Image (cartoon, grey):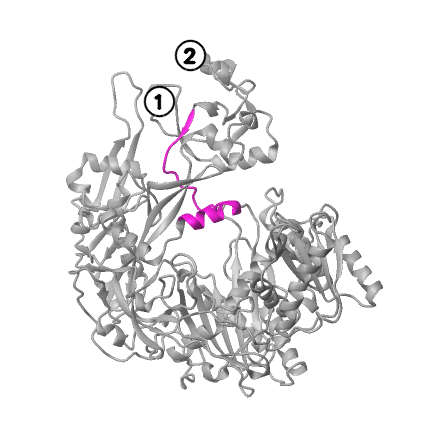
Amino acid sequence: MPPRRGTPRGRGGSQISSGPTRSHISSTGTGSHIAPASATTHQSAAHVTTIGVKRPGYGKSGKECKVVTNHFELRFDCPIIHHYDGPLMKELYQTLKLQHPALFGPLAFDGRKNLYSPSRLPFENDTQEYHISLQPQTATSRPSKVYRIRFSKTHQEINPEVLRNFVSGRSSHDADVTVATNALNVVLSMFPSENKRFASNARSFFVPEGNKNIGQGLTLWRGFFQSIRPAASRMTINIDISTGLMYSPGPLINLCLDFLQRPGNLRALEAPMPEPERRALSKFIAKLRIHTTHNKELSNKARTIKALVETSAITTKFTVDNVSQTVQQYYESTYNKRLQYPKLLTSGATLPLEICEVFEGQLRGKAQPPSSLTKDVVEFATKKPAERLANIKSALQLLGYGQSPYLRAFHLEVADQPIAVPARTLPPPNLTYAANKTLGLKPGVGAWDMSGHRFWKPGTVKGWVVVVFSKPHAWPMQKIREVAGGLSQACTAVGIVGFNASEPLIEYADPAKDIKTNLMNVGIRHNKEKGFNPSLLILILPPGSSAIYRAIKHFGDVEIGVATQCMMETKCYKGRFGQGGSPAGPSYFSNVALKVNAKLGGINVVPDTKQTGGILGDANNPVLIMGADAIHPPPDSQGRPSYTAVVGSIDSMASKYVASCRPQTSKQEMIDDLEEMTKEILHDFQGYRSQVEGKPGMPKRIFMFRDGVSEGQFQQVIDNEIPKLKAACKSFNIEPKITFVIVGKRHHTRLFPESSTQADRTGNCLAGTVIDQGITSPTEFDYFLQSHAGLLGTSRPAHYNVLLDENNMTPDALQQLTYTLCHIYARSTRSVSIPAPTYYADIVCSRSANHYDPKGPYQPDSIDHASSGSQRLKDAKTYFKPAHRASRMRMYFM
């Protein structure tokens, strides 16, 4: 279906067809709520403005179906909500509630400073002051600290009617809508937040039942996420299961030893400890809440762990009443406590580790689990669709919506069944291979078999080398030849030229020696024996070879410009050589061939142009498909830079891409160098079209699929990134029409098939399932697309938000283009979860460390770095090396 003609769409846009704006959904029965018919004709008034593009209508193509979502309708008949400001700790507010239950009992407090009331409080001049003590006063105790709390009514009165006007399309999204939504989220969270069984962070609540200790001082808890969201004609609550990463409770000594991966080895905590280990451990347990065991009167008092000092209880001294004594002496004289392990480090200057017990239910914060534990986390969090939906439904009871006095006080009611919405299953694109042979795909399957087909444009090998980073006794020559033969056969079968021309040169490399020297010597030997340099290096690596891998990629992608393909020795050969072992099966080598062809400059497959509405393959209207992403250092890192990537298609069928990657300010999402990076891509686009395709000309249309941007950053993208994209085009004296789409992955919406007949073999919705009504924005042009087939657990659809649409795309045309781009990911014969260019940008970001010399002065992933954040960014830019020109034009990042 072609794009719509007319005025380009940016902020605001055209009006949607009229229809009813309100509906009532019954909460009776055991089924799911069905989206009302009005959702399909939801009207936005002409005066309503949007951040991005106003919805132009709804899609119609594909096979109609219904899907169940994890959204529940929130019915609200709230009075005016009064807002009071009063900064205080959560513990103080709980004490205040106990002392004044009639006044503060039904109010909602966000745990920081915002207090919401369904009625105006009887404060003189709208201000009231209280004096609160956390500890009761006794005859023998010291005077406890008294806190002064002052509540003042703000000028802001929250009228929930603004939400009703917004979801019905009568008003724009503004600050009042955000404030009202946030206030209702606080009300929703109040009841579960007071349940002492729960641990919580932001909008998730976790329970200890069914937890799993995964080692390294960490335990996983199951929980539930909840968030109120506006949708067309109603407000909804998005509920999903979540996983909490907790500190393992119990003796602090055990926690520390688990973190060091030396359980039971107390000597590992003795002073002096190696400085890198001490710093890492100190950082891990910093701010951890513990209670002590040496004194019964203090056993329930929470204390906070400070940094680990370098000395033990025997040598650490402090002064009390002008008397200097060691920590060991202090506990013996004051508490009659003889320390069992006085040689261990202490927390701060006075706290021995052996008397500390870690409280249960402490979240690790924003820190990510170590990569070695990722598999455990995934296994714990993975649930099949039917099980996940059942757990989500059970959350209504667990979170206490029916029992919450806060929901009653604010006149809120949550439906007891999830919302079901109209959906469609889009037809997959036909794929074209060599000799214009077309492969038709089955709708909803999301995978295909390319047996009997050759790549659209096969690459060519001119000499290849196999380098094995293991000893000859583990990898004898015959074993290597069998693996090389399997790869050669698979590559030849799909059309790659040159594997049969000659046998590969085989070489052993010592992983303990310099990788660059090893590879240079291999190239020199090949040149001597064959008369030319090899165009492909195949490298067989042992487990735990991340450092070797990085050195190989820096050598091939950045310094020399030669294609490199790594294979893990445990994957490319199964079993023991000479004892029934054999090379991996054909499917393994076929998958490797997909990557090899792209790295050699080939193109694996292209989509049928007829199914893209003329967007791809139109010689008169060249199109550039782009993807962009930014990757950030861990939350607890200090000054490490972020990295950005921009990729762009250079061929007529948007199947071959070039990439640009750069460092930038730590944890900044907006891409600073987008203009310069786009210029690089436009230059390559122009060169490839004229020199390779013989079709001179620059793009007349650009489609950008931008990853990693949250809803709160959409305006920043409009203000910062889109102007840079246009400025890059202007530098080439072109003004292509731009469609800019945000690709969202970090959300909690899930889709479930309404019946087994609409599910794939894993119980997930069929690949190509799209929804653009029922739970989508009341005004913005957005849609959810589940473009991939399920493998494990419950699939996550991608959420697409259109911020700019100068190409005037119809919903059908843009949704079909998006789905088509999910089928040209060069690494796979499966449709993927997001468009290929977005996926490529993510990969390029993740490979950013490969752009630094492994032996150079700057190491991007180093933990200890003495320089400031600004100096580190300067160093990151100084020592960053772009991909070699030859690699750049060959999709080296595959």
**Residue picked out by circle 2:** 336
In the image, 195 versus 133, the foreground residue is 195
| Amino acid found under the numbered disc labelled 2 | Asn
| x 20%, y 35%: residue | 98
| Quadrant, the C terminus | bottom right
Q: Is residue 367 a member of the stretch shown in magenta?
A: yes
Q: Amino acid at mark 1?
A: Leu
Where is residue 748 drawn, in percent x and y? 36, 58
For the point 40% across and 86% down, the residue is 6
**Residue at the extreme bottom of the image, as rendered:** 620
Against 247, residue 789 (above or below) is: below
Of the pair 439 and 700, the residue shown nearer to us: 439
Q: Quadrant of residue 751?
A: bottom left
Q: Residue 813: x percent and y percent?
A: 41, 79
Q: Earlier in the sequence, mark 2 or mark 1?
A: 1
Q: Position of residue 361 (x, y in %)?
A: 36, 38
Residue 873 colored in magenta in the image: no
Q: Secondary structure beneath disc 1? A: helix
Residue at image mark 1:
298
- Residue 176 position (above or below residue 90): below
Disc 2 + disc 1, Cβ < 8 Å? no
Q: Residue at x 24, y 51 (%)?
A: 396
The magenta segment: 356-380
- As measured in the structure, the alpha-carbon distance from the residue carrying label 2 to the one carrying label 1 is 15 Å
